[in-house]
Every structure is written in C-alpha cells, then in structure tokens.
Amino acid sequence: MSLLEIRDVTKRFGGLVALDTVGLDINEGEILGLIGPNGAGKTTLFNCVTGFYRPDSGQIQFKGENLLGLTPHQICLKGVARTFQIVKAFHSMTVAESVTTGALARTNYMEQARKKAASVLELVGLADKKSVPIKNLTIVDRKRLGLGCALATEPKLMLLDEVAAGLNPVEIDQVTDLLRRIRDLGLTLLVVEHVMKLIMPVADRIVVLHHGKKIAEGKPSDVARNESVIEAYLGRE
Amino acid sequence: MVGLFAYLGSAWNLGCGYTGKLSWGHSAFMGLGAYASTMLYIAYRITPWLGALVGIVIAAGFGTVVGAICFRLGLKGHYFVIATIALAEIVRVTFINWADLGGAWGLLMPVVGDSLYDFQFHSTRAPYYYIILVMLLGVLYLKWRIANSKLGYYFTAIKDDEEMAETLGIDTFRYKLIAMTISAALTAFGGTFYAQYVMYISPDTVMAVHVSTDILMGPVVGGMGTLLGPLLGAAIIQPIMELTRAYVGGRGLDYVVAGLLTVGVALMRPSGVIGWFEKPFEAISRPSLEIHREG
C-alpha cells in the first residue's frame, strides 16, 4: 500500500479547472518529483493534500486514512508536513524559537522541544545561526529554516514547494544533498520543483502536471524524453 | 489610575497584543466584572473578592463566546476590531435597559468604611495602590511564565503567521480562544477594582467604547506583545490625559490629545515607545531570547 493515495481529485475555481481528476501514489521512502509549467496546478494539489483547499471531488488518503475534511493542523499531526513556495516564517522569532515551535507539535515540554529543535538545526545546517532573528536570514537559510520547522513536527511525509527557487547553483547542490539526507532518515518527500538541476538527479519518480491534468509519470530520464512533456514545456513546432 | 490601566493594558496585551487580535471590546469584560461584584455586594453583601471571581467566570465565558463567533467567522484585521466594538456595544445597551441592574443610572456602592472584606478604603487610599500593584505584578508574572511556555510560543506563532502556525500543527482556533478567555478573565478583575475604587459604575463609565480605547492605548503606545510596553504606555498616556483635563479642561479634549499621540506613535513607531529602550530592557521583555543564547 502506498503512503499517500490521491484519487481523481478535481478542484475548480469558478470556471477554471485547476485540478482535473488527478491521481497519484507516493510510496514510502521515495522522493517523488512533481513538475509542470506555471499554473499547472502543483501548488493547488499541495493545498488540497494539506487541508487548505477542499477538493470538489476525489479521495486523498494517508496511510489508509482519509484526509479530506481535516484542518491543516490535524493533517500535520497525522504526519504530513509542508513548506511554502514563498517562504513563510515567524518574523518576531529567532531561528531556534521557530523550530522549537514546530517541535511543540509533539510535546508539551519546552526542554524536549528545544532538544528536538537543536538536533533538527544540526541536520539542516543552521546550528550556528540559532539565535539569529529570522528577518536577518538569507534566502537559502530561510529555505533551510522552512525545512527545519517542518521536520521538527516529526512528519512521515513532507511536501516541499519549490525549495530551489531563487537559489544559486552552489546552494541548489547543498539543498539537493539535504533532501537526500532527509530521505535517508526514512521520510518520504513530494517535491514540487521548477529547477530541473535539483529534481532530475534526486527524484526516484516524476509526475508531470499540465493544465490540471497528469500528462506523464515515470523515471526522470523517461519523463525528460516524453513527447507530451516536451510539448507542454516548449510548445509544438 | 495609571496602575489600573497598566494592569488592564497588560491583561489586554496578554490575549490580544500577543496573538495580534486587536479587540476593541474589552470594556464589556471590564463592565461584566464590575457589575458582577457590585451587584452581588449590594444584593447579598458578598465580598467583592468573591464577586470578582464570579465576574471573572462570567467574562471568561463571554470572551469565549465572542472569540468563538469572531474566529469561526474568520474575522481578521479591521473586521475583527469592528465586531468586538459591536459586541461590546450590545452588552452596554443591554445593561442600560436592564432596570434591575440600575439601568442607565448605574450602581452606587454603599459606603461602609475601611475594610478589606468590603474592599473599601477611605481614610487613606494607599491600600488601593498596593492592591493594584500586586495585581499588576501578578499579570506580569503570568505573562512572563506564558512567554516561556508552549502557550507563549503558539501565541507568537499565531500573531506572526496563522497559516504557517496551522501547518506546524497548531490549532489556531483553539489557541486564539484561550488567549481571548485569559484576557477577558483578567480584565474582569480590573473591572471589580475600578468599581471598588470609584464606588460608582454605570454602563457608560465601564462599558463604553472609550473605556476600551483607554485600555488599548497603553499597549499600543508602549509596545504590543512586549512585557513592559503596556506599563510604559499607561504611564505616558494616563498622566497626559489627566493633565489635559486639569489644565485645558473640556470633556473629550483629553481623548483628542491622547488619540493624536496614539496615532502618531502607531504611524511612526509601530513597535511602540519601548522600542527606544530595547537594549536595556531586552533581557526582561524577551526572556525567551536569553534562554536560547545560554543553550
């Protein structure tokens, strides 16, 4: 049984069909890449899975449990964490305080939460910046922080929305490396990405969305050669 | 009065300044507290201390209802402010028309002489000063304890970004309600103190919008969400209003002056006057920072 099952999910905004009977499975321990041109419905799909949107029809199950109708915080407590495309952060907190806030999802004791936060900061490479106010962080560090906050809630599945956007090539390599390390901890990742340099080497499988429909699915190398994918990205001659 | 508004401002700050939900209806909680203790004393001679407890329970209940309505409807920003004013006005108008509770005339506290049981001190006003001082220290201690707990982290998270808070497993609806309830309860106790200090309450003196304004000007001027901001704000605003009344006179002019000051501070220094003192006060007003530095 797959960890996350999405079946025939449709989401409309007025006349616009943002997601059209999309179905996909995520297996435990894999990194699944979700790509597609702007407006393909990737972020909408994220919002449906994490409880920010209610799909008009379809099924979403996590470990065999229905997620539809749950609020975002309930879904987080079930073990599904996410990051945001435009990094959200607690601007009046320090790095360590925000990750501690994430860790408090699993404990009522400050000491435990702080300990958890310290180990997460070590993992994402922010240990030496733990006392820095968030407003002073660089973009790449904000992305690390977003990952750290999500990791601190002890998820089984993480949904990452464009972690590489706005990063330079060196930083992309660092983040790619970090994603592998997170996967090696036993987590499953669903990664929305525009940056092919990041997604192609790291993903086990790739799903391509276009105009709210799934147009391709398979190994990165196969998908990159797929006719309809090339057409969606580059147009037809 | 500075002490009372420092207390009320801190109580407001604990719930509203902390979670960023600006309630302009705290006069209702203050009024409920004042009326509960005064009514129980007049009718049954129940000590105002016990009456205060009853007021706290009533106000906390009302705060929960107000919060539940506003937060369930997803009211944010200005809409939340307007809704809280409206709900407080409903309470005020209800009390004006409630003849058994004195209606628009209000309630006069019977004078019985100095007594801790009766919460009255006339030969010297000093006991009032010490009582409000203890109350103020109590609320500051509570705020400090909360700042270093899960509750405080969650309140700050909600103020900074509610969506992000939700994704990190925070039941934002529940924690906003908790904030509102704590704040309402503490404010009601302030209402009892006011009733015992002034010895006269009416819907227009304890439940009107200008009372809410009095309450929230302190934290806004001093610094919302900070530990000592409401104290500083009340210490600035209340004497200025008192002096305006004494030397310039005229009902309403005091609010014009205080209002201008508040708007000025809000525009030029949203973090409040306390921001200018950030350095020396940092260790006190942001205790959570210190702990991380040690660890």
Image (spheres, rainbow, N blue to C red):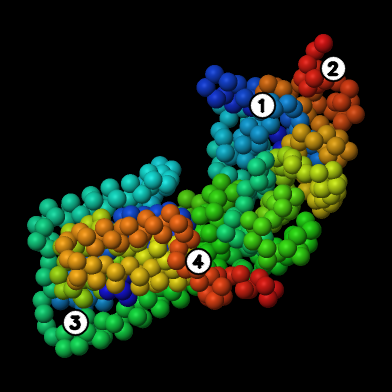
Observer-side mark, 3 or 1, equals: 1
Observer-side mark, 1 or 2, equals: 1
For label 4, the residue is B275
Let me know if residue A26 appears in the view: no
Which element is circle 4 on? helix
Picture coordinates of residue A197 (x, y %)? 85, 37
Rounded to the nearest whole Å, what is the CA distance between mark 3 and mark 1? 69 Å
In the rendered image, which quarter is residue A210 located in? top right
Rounded to the nearest whole Å, what is the CA distance between mark 2 and mark 3? 87 Å
Q: Amino acid at mark 3?
A: Gln
Respond whether the residues carrying marks 3 and 1 are from the same subunit: no
Which residue is at the far bottom? B123
Q: Which mark is residue B120?
A: 3
Picture coordinates of residue B229 (x, y %)? 44, 68
For label 2, the residue is A227
Q: Are marks 1 and 2 in contact (CB under 8 Å)?
A: no
Q: Are marks 2 and 4 in contact (CB under 8 Å)?
A: no
Q: Could you tell which of marks 3 and 4 lies nearer the N-terminus?
A: 3
Closer to us: A156 or A191: A191
Picture coordinates of residue B181 (x, y %)? 39, 60
Neighbor class of circle 2 (other Cα within 10 Å; few <14, some 14-19, many 20+) is few
Q: Are marks 1 and 4 in contact (CB under 8 Å)?
A: no
Rounded to the nearest whole Å, what is the CA distance between mark 3 and mark 4? 38 Å
Above or below, comparing residue B214 to residue A227 in the picture: below
Let me know if residue B277 appears in the view: yes
